[in-house]
Image (cartoon, grey):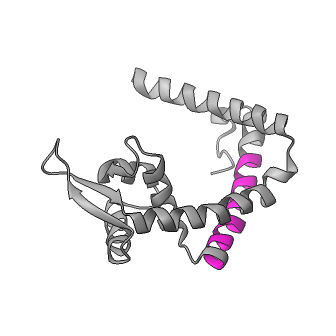
Amino acid sequence: MLAADDPSDAAPAPALDAWSSLVAVYQGVLHDVVGALDRDAAMDSGIFSALAYLERAVPPHRMRMSDLQRLLHPRYSQPGLSRLVQRMEADGLVERQPDTEDGRAAVVVSTSTGRARYRRSNTVYAAAVRERFGHHLSAEQCRLLTELLGEVLARRDAERHAD
């Protein structure tokens, strides 16, 4: 995925270099953060990710199963996400409810237990991100990186909506 097979189709070298650097940093930091979640919070990273999306959802703490699956794809297929949500239900972290707007759909709602587990795990997550990533950058570098990546996201969203 990092190397182009046909040079005539290759992205310009600066784009490939930037992408390779982004992937290398992401994979290394993610490995450390996942380890910290497991070791220090006894939290599976998939469960943490699902609870984090539910925490940031609008309205808070609830999301259609299909929207959660889109956010967690490709890590979780639809059947894989169903199994993850079943495990989370068994642990009392979420409940599935019928979608009032679409009777065929389900909504995943975090419980008070799920929200408390997320808050405790999020302190571990935030500390690991600061230690493994944040302390290597100044506040200005973080702001600039956030701005640049935000531009990429906005342009990709605009392209998708134009199609």
- Which one is in front, 62 or 75? 62
Left or right: where 134 falls relative to 10? right
Q: Point out the stretch of residues depicted in magenta.
A: 20-39
Q: Which residue is drawn at 78% across and 39% down?
A: 142
Q: Position of residue 58 (x, y in %)?
A: 40, 40
Q: Where is residue 23 in the image (x, y as percent from the top left)?
A: 70, 51
Say which of 29 and 18 sits in front.
Answer: 29
Residue at 68% across, 67% down: 31
Number of numbered markers: 0
Q: What predominant SS class does the magenta segment belong to? A: helix
Which x, y percent locates residue 7? 69, 38
Q: Residue at x 55, y 61 (%)?
A: 119
Describe residue 87's horizontal placement relative to residue 136 as left or right: left
Residue 39, relative to residue 26: is it above or below?
below
Q: Position of residue 35 (x, y in %)?
A: 67, 73
Is residue 34 located in the magenta-colored stretch of the structure?
A: yes
Regarding residue 11, the answer to whether it shows in the image is no
Please say if 150 is above or below 32: above
Residue 141 falls inside the magenta stretch: no
Q: Which of 78 and 96 is in front in this view?
A: 96
Where the C terminus falls, by quadrant? top left
**Do we see residue 74 in this rendering?**
yes
Judged from this view, the residue extending furthest toward the top is: 162
**Vertically, is 162 above or below 133?**
above
- 140 or 121, which is in the foreground? 121
Which residue reaches farthest left? 103
Q: 50 left or right of 101?
A: right
